[in-house]
């Protein structure tokens, strides 16, 4: 049965979509059958995986509102073994349209029951807010993954996210765990980054992944070319960091890759 990871942080600009996309892409290169679900109305994970949003007949919005089956919206990504359930701007209206739907928090969970046996890893890219779409992701996931920027405001709002996690686990998804925290946009030359890292590790301990993702222009550029970093800049510093992080994730969650990554872990 697939491991389902929800990449979530209600604060925008923390590397959430970049992390979800690149971990999904790297997993696919390791012969791990991977599904990337985009439930962010911005649809950045969709375009970053090489899918033209304008050409799509239907998206996750149409699945959630019941007009199409989930199997009809799954797209082939830009890498073998990578499938994508795409999103685009019409998803913005889903929260209003679903307001009277009974048990609307479990829509995505019920949808995934139909297909999760076909994948080893499912990654959900959440919107930068704690709305009904994010709650659907947390009700579907086995683990919450929190990308966290190494800057002054990084911890702002983290308490609210943890509180939401606890509420979901208590009332909706008792098997949900915090799978890990990813420290992104790290510039270890600054004392501020070091302080943020130490503060996060003080509270979350071993939940914090050892690999820090560096600030990288190439990582930021890659989605505009419709490619994850492993295709756009395979030898780049950011790509190597995500490869090391992916290996940590594979080991932590017992995901079996056929061709283990040997890149050095970047701390």
Image (cartoon, rainbow, N blue to C red):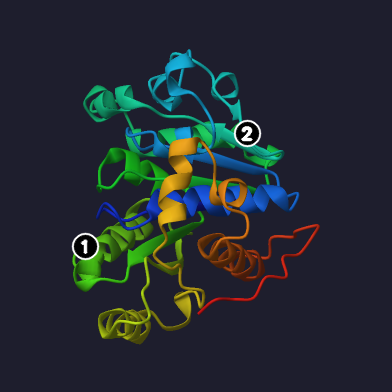
- The kind of secondary structure element at disc 1 is helix
Q: Which mark is residue 160?
A: 1
Within 10 Å of the Cα at label 1, are there few (<14), some (14-19), or many (20+) other Cα atoms?
some
Q: Position of residue 224 (x, y in %)?
A: 43, 38
Vertical comparison of 21 with 241: above or below: above
In the drawing, does residue 88 fall left or right of residue 109?
Answer: left
Q: Position of residue 22 (x, y in %)?
A: 54, 52
Measuring 23% from the left and 28% from the top, which residue is drawn there? 99
In the drawing, does residue 255 fall left or right of residue 104?
Answer: right
Which of the 4 quarters of the picture holds residue 186? bottom left
Of 56 and 176, the residue lying toward us: 56
Instruction: Tell me whether circle 1 and circle 2 mark residues in contact (CB < 8 Å).
Output: no
Residue 7 in view: no
Residue 44 in view: yes
In the drawing, does residue 74 fall left or right of residue 90?
Answer: right
Of 109 and 262, the residue lying toward us: 262
Q: Position of residue 192 (x, y in %)?
A: 25, 81
Vertical comparison of 234 with 102: above or below: below
Identify the residue at the far right of this view: 258
Q: Position of residue 146 (x, y in %)?
A: 39, 62
Measuring 62% from the left and 35% from the top, which residue is drawn there? 78
Measuring 44% from the left and 76% from the top, which residue is drawn there? 208
Q: Where is mark 2, residue-wise?
A: 115
Which of the 4 quarters of the picture holds residue 77? top right
Measuring 25% from the left and 48% from the top, which residue is drawn there? 130
Of labels 1 and 2, earlier in sequence is: 2
């Amino acid at each position: 049965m697939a491991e389902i990871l929800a990449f979530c942080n209600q604060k925008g600009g923390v590397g959430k979509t970049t992390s979800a996309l690149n971990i999904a892409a790297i997993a696919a290169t390791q012969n791990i059958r991977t599904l990337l679900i985009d439930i962010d109305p911005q649809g950045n994970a969709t375009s970053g995986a090489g899918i033209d949003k304008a050409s799509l007949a239907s998206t996750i919005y149409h699945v959630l509102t019941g007009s199409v089956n989930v199997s009809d919206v799954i797209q082939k990504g830009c890498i073998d073994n990578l499938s994508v359930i795409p999103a685009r701007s019409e998803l913005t209206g889903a929260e209003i349209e679903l307001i009277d739907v009974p048990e609307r928090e479990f829509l995505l969970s019920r949808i995934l029951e139909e297909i999760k046996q076909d994948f080893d890893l499912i990654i959900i890219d959440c919107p930068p807010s704690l709305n009904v779409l994010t709650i659907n992701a947390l009700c579907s996931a086995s683990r919450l993954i929190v990308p966290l920027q190494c800057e002054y405001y990084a911890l702002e709002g983290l308490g609210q996210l943890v509180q939401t996690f606890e509420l979901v686990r208590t009332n909706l998804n008792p098997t949900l765990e915090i799978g890990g925290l990813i420290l992104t946009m790290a510039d270890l030359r600054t004392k501020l980054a070091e302080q943020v890292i130490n503060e996060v590790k003080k509270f979350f301990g071993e939940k914090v992944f050892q690999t820090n993702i560096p600030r990288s222009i190439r990582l930021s550029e890659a989605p505009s070319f419709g490619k994850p970093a492993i295709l756009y800049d395979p030898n780049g510093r950011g790509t190597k960091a995500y490869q090391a992080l992916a290996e940590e994730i594979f080991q932590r969650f017992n995901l079996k890759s056929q061709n283990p990554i040997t890149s050095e872990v970047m701390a």
